[in-house]
Amino acid sequence: MRRLPVHWILLGPTLLFVAGMALFPLGYSLILSFREWKLAKSNTAGGFVGVQNYVNLLTDDPEFFDAIRVTGIFITADVLITLAVALGAALLLHRTGRLNSLARTLLILPFVMSPALIGISFKFFLNAEYGVLAHAIGVIFPAMKDSVWLADPTLSMVAIVTSDVWHWAPYMTLVMLGGLASIPTETQEAARIDGASSWAVFRDITWPQLLPVVSVVLVLKTVFALKAFDTIYTLTTGGPGNATKTLAYFVYEQGFSYYDMGYAAAAAYLLTAVLLVLAGFYLRLVFAKTR
């Protein structure tokens, strides 16, 4: 009898765990997306309805399209602001010194915090009666004094974007710092000797060499923004109204508020299709960079 290689024996428990915790739920939810299942009426899945759940989503559900619009606004603001903050912070911290080393160490703290905890914290900070952040903003901008942040559609969107940027910008800054460290200093020093300004050095030398890293950060942050749920759930619960109801929250609401499991699975797979496309872009960027 042929013996199994040792590495397969050692990998066996891990592969079984991945199959049970990831592959099986993915396959089951895909099958579920083609079935009708109202959990409030029955604890077992109903019959197959083909692509009807997908057709209803794409042709007869204004809330789904509104969630797409909200997601687009959230992703655009979140990704661009995170990218700008991370790039600016990386350029400031790309120097030697004890203070910069300490700042780099502290940067990881917001990232390791739970997104749910961040949402709860910002909910207290922006409370109209006792919120420290809401009071500080009211002092700096008197026109915003006594503003009820989480009851205003625009301000609630600003709140979830701000909380997500605060969570992810430090991590992206560290990624940017890694990219800056890989750029040869000789070209920058030669340009300065030739009389180039700091802006010219950044525009003509640093930015072109940093662009692959920026592209990776852009794709990664877009994926993370599409999946954002914890902060939205704890901070705004998709409100006021549907002002902050993203696609991820829409999927949750269909499944665990309306108990329409088949419909929720179909919406989740439409979101997954977008994530797979972005994952493909990410892999192409990574493999292109390693060649």
Image: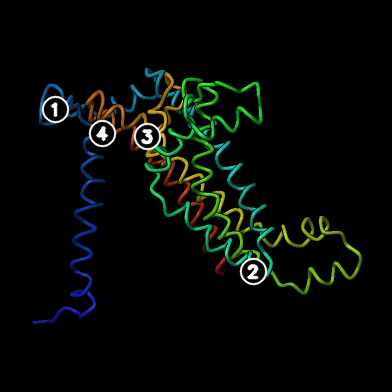
Q: Earlier in the sequence, mark 3 or mark 1?
A: 1
Real-space CA distance between mark 1 and mark 4, rounded to the nearest whole angstrom: 11 Å
Q: Are marks 2 and 3 in contact (CB under 8 Å)?
A: no
Could you tell me which residue is drawn at 58 percent across and 56 percent down? 173
Real-space CA distance between mark 2 and mark 4, rounded to the nearest whole angstrom: 46 Å
> Disc 4 designates what residue?
33
Few, some or many residues within 10 Å of mark 3 (<14, 14–19, 20+): some
> Disc 1 designates what residue?
46
Q: Which mark is residue 181?
A: 2
**Foreground disc of the pair 2, 1:** 2
**Foreground disc of the pair 2, 3:** 3
User: Is the C terminus in the top left, top right, bottom left or bottom right quadrant?
Assistant: bottom right
> Disc 3 designates what residue?
234
Amino acid of disc 3: Thr
Amino acid of disc 1: Gly
Q: Position of residue 191 (x, y in %)?
A: 85, 67
